[in-house]
Image (cartoon, rainbow, N blue to C red):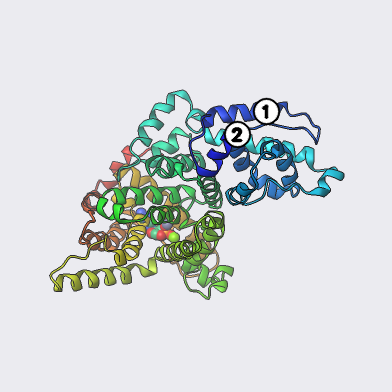
Amino acid sequence: MEYLYGLLFGTEPKQSDADARTALHAKLDALPDDRDAQITLTAAELRILKEATTTTRQKHGGGDELFVRMHSNLTEDLDPSTADAVVDAYGASPLKPNPLAKRRPSPETPQLRKACKNAVADLISERQLASSVPKERRKTLEMALSEVNAWGFDVWSVVDAFQGDTLLASRAIVDAVVFEARGFRAASTSHILRQVVSKMLASYQDVPYHNCLHGADVLQAMHALLNLAPTFDDALDDDVVLVTLLACLSHDVGHPGLTNNFLVETGHELAIRYNDASPLENMHAAVALNLAKPYLRTRPPADQKQNRALWIGLLLATDMKEHSQQIFELERALSKSKERGATYEACTPEHHVPCLKVFIHACDVSNPAKPWAVYRRWTALVMEEFWRQAELERERGLPLTVPARDATDLAQFQKGFIAFIRPLFAAADRIGGVDMSLPLERLDDTARRWQSPRAEAYDDDVRE
Ligand code: CMP
Ligand code: MG
Ligand code: ZN
């Protein structure tokens, strides 16, 4: 029964994940192609198998049969009173085999078993993130990830360590923040959380800037910004912190690499669906919350509602169209408090959500507030995406709404962008318990570099 305690109450299994993965691999390899073959798994192995095969089982309908048979020997001595808890933990019952399956062999079983093995192999390679990095780059990765709590964190060192694989780099960053630094690995639902994270990362498109790395970067920036505001961070419920981090991770999910303007001007299906109102952000929220369902369902009903509302609010607050209004409202709230001789404090419960909206938006536009070399790589990518859109606009005879490749004064454009976003950081810095001095210093440093006629010479520092 020991495995059940790990399963139900989230206590650390004795077997390490690495050992469990190796053992699971060996057991699956040894499994004969006999549909009644039995396999005995420990709790850790079972969790890893379950995580690895969820999508596979969904894709290959009937997969639960195999899953049930694999685990029937584990569950037969289960006390019926704990059955519901297992169902909750799994989202499906491993206890009720389909009676038809006993009589009619499923023709899909061999493919399914192969698919399960492949899924486990994929998972194993994904999970062995550090060890999948060549030896000579491992040190770089360790050093880069050791800075994950800091505002100046260099995402590109992680990407370089994974030889340009942004999906693996993003996973490593999310793992380091969510499961290591923030400690959500201890949650009894952490296996569901990991699946949700994987799906979110996989639902980003392969576009130059708005890919999964940008999601992971905004998540890390939020984590670092909360670290710079410890009283606010402490005042937030763990649940709120987790939803906020996941909202950051998913805030641009499915982004097609085109702006709202473009979608509206071209009558894109997203603009039609959302009546031209923040089509991208509405889509990101709809996709993200759909992917988040398995996690949200693990929460009590009242929290589910609150989490959903928070998530939607945070995602809609990332529309650049809200930028000036957001600053205006924040400044008004700051002045009102000042008139009363008080400070607008982030940790006052009714200020939590407005402050988190300011934070997510600030993180989203924060690349010029990062070290120059980090910022310059982001800028190259965001410009590439704009330039591709400008080419489409030209092809279609539309007025240009973004800079064109052959007509970009980069220094001018970047100085304009920095001047546009600086008031947000400056206003946020006036919130009680929030310290934006480091991002502001960096923003000013970046702006100063662009002032220099030799600004592009700094690009020598930039690794491409
Ligand atoms: P998105 O991430 O959806 O929301 C914030 C937007 O800011 C982003 O899309 C880009 O359009 C824009 N942005 C971010 N970084 C830069 C930058 N360095 N230069 C110009 N625009 C940027
Ligand atoms: Mg966006
Ligand atoms: Zn974004």
Residue found 64% across the figure and 44% down from its top: 79
Q: Is residue 12 left or right of residue 420?
A: right
Residue picked out by circle 2:
45
Amino acid type shown at disc 1: Lys
Say if mark 2 contacts mark 1, CB within 8 Å: yes
Secondary structure type for disc 1 = helix
Residue 33 sits in quarter: top right
Q: Residue at x 15, y 70 (%)?
A: 338
Ligand 3 within 8 angstroms of badge 2 C-beta: no
Residue on which the image places disc 1 = 27
> Observer-nearest residue: 259 or 188?
188
List x then y, in percent, for residue 200. Answer: 53, 51
User: How far across and down, in percent of the image, does residue 139 sit?
Assistant: 39, 27
Quadrant (top left, top right, bottom left, bottom right) of the C terminus: top left
318 relative to 458 in the view: left or right: right
In which quadrant of the rendered view does residue 345 lie?
bottom left
